[in-house]
Amino acid sequence: MWLSAGIAALASVFAVAYNSDDSNAYLLPTYLIFAIWIGLGLDRALRAIRRLHPLAAPVATAGLAILLAWRAVSILPQVDASQDRRAIIYATSVLATAPQNAIVVSESDLDTFPLWYYHYALGARPDMAALVDPLLDFDWYRRNLRAVYPDLQIPETTASSWLDAIAAANPRRSICHTSATDDRALACAASAAPPSSTRPANAKIATVVINK
């Protein structure tokens, strides 16, 4: 009991202190431990009421089973993601409309993971580079980008933001920003010297709007 309590406490502290939008997912070990405790508590409760009447425990067990079944059916529509195609629509729309050799910059898990799946796992749009802006501050991430995108120029140091430095080092590549929560899923700034075959000379900003 004390071991499980210690594990639950450590998991809870880590989840609260971890600076991430989905840090609540790290509470899963705590939820599992609480479920075990609830099960042990119900076992003791059923043993206690069995002394009151021979049918008390079976009736209570049946009532709990009905309650759990009703709860499962009532929340099923809330957790059923079989028809949720938002990530598919978002990723395919962005990848289909990003300019040739674009640098596509995402900001959060919502707009990063769908692009990673299509770009890295499925091999979609090998001409473009997928960057995560908050991760650019880390050396390991920039080293990884150099290995994955040998043609992408990434400075060793910068006096400005890393994204500005990368944009300046790759003047012929458009910089596109994504958003999974905004109707404007992709906003692209024209490159400093865009190829005539991919963008008209007077282009400044290109946006992609998707229906969610």
Image: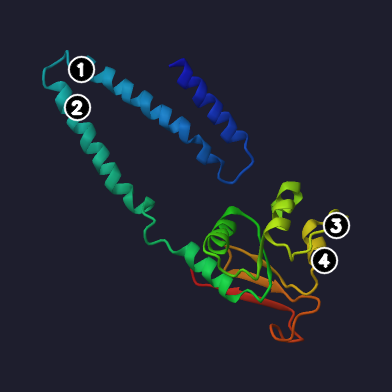
User: Which residue is disc 1 drawn over?
Assistant: 49
Say if 73 sits above or below 84 in the image. Answer: above
**Left or right relative to 75: residue 136:** right
Per the model, the C-alpha gap separating discs 2 and 1 is 9 Å
User: Is 64 placed above or below 106 here?
Assistant: above
SS class, disc 4 = helix
Q: How packed is label 3: few (under 14 Cα within 10 Å), some, or many (20 or more)?
A: few
**52 left or right, relative to 140:** left
Asked whether the beta carbons under mark 1 and mark 4 sit within 8 Å of each other, the answer is no
Among the two numbered marks 1 and 4 on one chain, the one whose residue lies closer to the N terminus: 1
Labels 2 and 1 touching (C-beta < 8 A) = yes
Say what amino acid the circle numbered 2 marks: Ala
Q: Residue 145: x percent and y percent? A: 70, 56
Instruction: Select label 3 or label 4 by which is in front.
Output: 4
Instruction: Identify the residue shown where x is 23% and y is 20%.
Output: 46
Q: Which residue is mark 4?
A: 169
What amino acid type is highlighted by mark number 1? Ile
Name which residue type carries label 4.
Ala
- Asked if disc 3 and disc 4 are in contact, CB closer than 8 Å, the reply is no
Residue position marked by numbered label 3 in the rendering: 160
Marked residue nearer the N-terminal end (3 or 2): 2
N-terminal of the pair, mark 1 or mark 3, is 1
> Which residue, given by chain and number where applicable, does mark 2 sit on?
60
In x, y percent, where is residue 210? 53, 72
> How far apart are the alpha carbons under marks 2 and 4?
70 Å
Farthest-out residue, top? 51
Residue 147 x/y as whole percent = 70, 56
Q: CA distance from mark 1 to mark 4?
A: 74 Å
Q: Secondary structure at mark 1?
A: helix
Q: Are marks 2 and 4 in contact (CB under 8 Å)?
A: no
